[in-house]
Amino acid sequence: MAGTPWYNNQPSGVVYVGKIAYGFKGEIMPEGTNIVLLDGTKGIAEYAFTQKNLVSITIPASVSYIDDRAFRNGNLTNESLIIYGYHGSHAEQYANSKNITFIAIDPHTITYNANGGTGAPAAQTKTQGAPLTLSGTIPTRSGYIFKGWATNATATTAQYQPGGSYTADANATLYAVWEQESVTPLPANKTALANRINAVKDTPKGNYTDASWSVFQTALSNAQNVANNPSATQAQVDNALAALNAAYAGLAENPPPHPPTDPPATPKKYIFSTKYEATPLNWILFFVCFGFIWMWF
């Protein structure tokens, strides 16, 4: 076929007859040549690629026939040749049978895991031996900063960045690496506590019981400490206020003393005197009384 008008009209490089790789057109194959056959190629003809400068050839999975002498230079197989192909393909079987180095080019799936976040990129396919540009999509997670991607779900340092290059020839899952945002808490609102302290701090001891007064003084002291603490949390402020209110409401007075009771009454003693004094008045009274008695009878 070489030398025919049809062949002469073919461009330099791999010549195809239908879907068969017929050969390489050119007087001298350039040194370090790497050939990639077209997808859909069905076979490789006898003595198609015998030039010594052929370094590698990539054979698609569609190839189902390779002539035994497709890669022979004289009577010797090109031992330095590398065949790139797919696992389980005819190219792999041929390379193994001819002791030719075979390197699989099966596509690798790179998946993304948001690792607690949302919006992970869709999976990507990586070609063997070719770098993959990672997706530029960035996931999100409330309260966290995205640091990049890593192959370990617990990693704290990113190995890859969105839009970066991934070169490993293997399936992989990339996990989002997160860093928690530092949140500065709002200062506690101490207005109600301060107002309550001012309202009760001058309460006199008065007649309150020692026990209730001690509880009140402890709550008041704690409330003042919390009010003066610039690092106090809102929960501490609220708890101090509640304790102070409860202690103030719990102040109890001592009971009043009992009134004195009257001593028992002393029975009256009637003393009858038998002594009679003969005074002029007594004599007059005697005769008057005697006269009434006499007249009555």
Image (tube, rainbow, N blue to C red):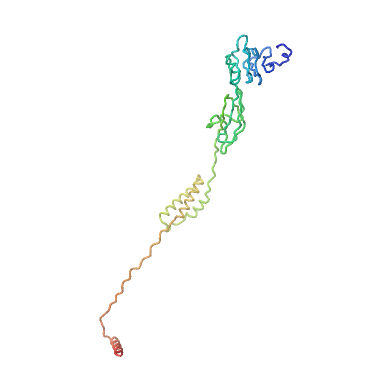
- Residue 8, image x and y in percent? 72, 13
Q: Residue furthest front?
A: 64
- 5 lies above or below 260: above
State the image quarter where residue 28 is shown.
top right
Count of marks overlaid on the render: 0
- 51 lies above or below 246: above
Q: Is residue 263 left or right of residue 141?
A: left
- Residue 147, image x and y in percent? 57, 33
Q: Quadrant of the C terminus?
A: bottom left
- Residue 61, image x and y in percent? 62, 21
State the image quarter where residue 18 is shown.
top right
Q: Residue furthest right?
A: 5
Q: Residue furthest left?
A: 275
Q: Is residue 234 left or right of residue 286?
A: right
- Residue 192, image x and y in percent? 52, 51
- 64 lies above or below 75: below
Q: Residue furthest bottom?
A: 295
Q: Is residue 167 left or right of residue 7?
A: left
- 281 lies above or below 194: below
Please name whichever residue, 28 or 189, is drawn nearer the observer in this view of the structure. Answer: 28
Q: Is residue 78 left or right of residue 223?
A: right
Q: Quadrant of the N terminus?
A: top right
Please name whichever residue, 17 or 264, is drawn nearer the observer in this view of the structure. Answer: 17
